[in-house]
Amino acid sequence: MNVRVVPANEASWEDLTAVFGGSYPGRCRCQRFKVVGWIWRDSTQEERSEALRAQTACGDPDAPATSGLVAYADGEPAGWVAVEPRVAYPKLRTMPVPWSGRQEDKDDPDVWAVTCFAVRAGYRGRGLTYDLAKAAVGFARERGARALEAYPMITEPGKVITWGELHVGARQVFEEAGFTEVAHPTKRRVVMRVDIQ
C-alpha cells in the first residue's frame, strides 16, 4: 500500500467520516476524554460529530489547529489518529491510567497525547496504526511539543481484544515509533512517552 498521512484539516469531513464508519471510535468520535458529563454516551452522536468536526477543522488547510491525522491508503481514506496537546483532553486529568505512580504537571501544554486510532473496515490488519503513530510524533514535533504520550494496551498472542478496546493502540505500535514505557498502571495498560525536544 502507498500510505500518505495528512493533518485532519487537510482532509475532507467526508473522508474522515468514511474512516470512522460504524466502529467504536466512530460512535465516540474521539470525545471520550473531552465531553461534558460522566461518560461520552451522555452526549448525542450528533453533538459528538459536531464537536469533532470543529476540533479537526476538516477541509480548512489554513486552520491554526487540528486534532488529528488522516491516513490515505492508495488514495482512499483509511485511518485516523487523535493527537493534540494533552490539556485538550480534560478527562485525562482525572483518570488513573495516565497518572498512577507519576508526579507530573497535568497542565503542561508542551506535552501532547495520542488517545485514539480508527482504521476503516477493509484496511485493518495492514499496519496503518504504525504509520499513524510515527506520523503523530512528527506532527507533534512540528507544532512544538516537548513530549508525546500514549496509553496503549498490552496485547497477547492469540487473545482477542473485544468491543474496540484497542482504539488506544497496542504497545508494540508505539515501541516501533520510538516511545518507551514510563508507567505500567494496570495489567493491560501502559503509559508510553517519547521526548521530542
Image (tube, grey):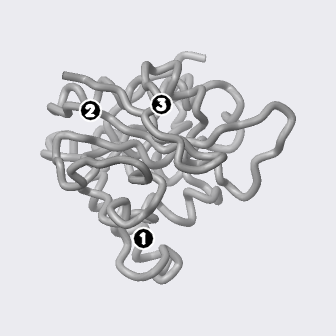
Instruction: Check disc 1 and report the residue beneath it.
Output: 48
Instruction: Check disc 3 and report the residue beneath it.
Output: 181
Q: Residues within 10 Å of mark 1 (few under 14, many from 20)?
A: many
Q: Secondary structure at mark 3?
A: strand
| 3 over 72 or under it: above or below | above
Q: Amino acid under label 3?
A: Glu
Q: Quadrant of residue 94?
A: bottom left
Is 157 positioned to the left or the right of 192 in the image? right
From the viewer's side, name the closer residue of 2 and 97: 97
Q: CA distance from mark 2 to mark 1?
A: 28 Å
Can residue 19 be seen here? The reply is no
Can residue 101 be seen here? The reply is yes
Q: CA distance from mark 1 to mark 3?
A: 31 Å
- The image shows residue 133 at horizontal and vertical percentages of 45, 29
- The image shows residue 165 at horizontal and vertical percentages of 65, 53
Kindly identify the residue that appears in the image at 35 percent across and 78 percent down. 36
Is 48 positioned to the left or the right of 41 in the image? left
Please report whichever mark, 2 or 3, sits nearer to the chain's N-terminal start.
Answer: 2
Please report whichever mark, 1 or 3, sits nearer to the chain's N-terminal start.
Answer: 1
Instruction: Check disc 2 and report the residue beneath it.
Output: 147
Q: Nearer the viewer, mark 2 or mark 3?
A: 3
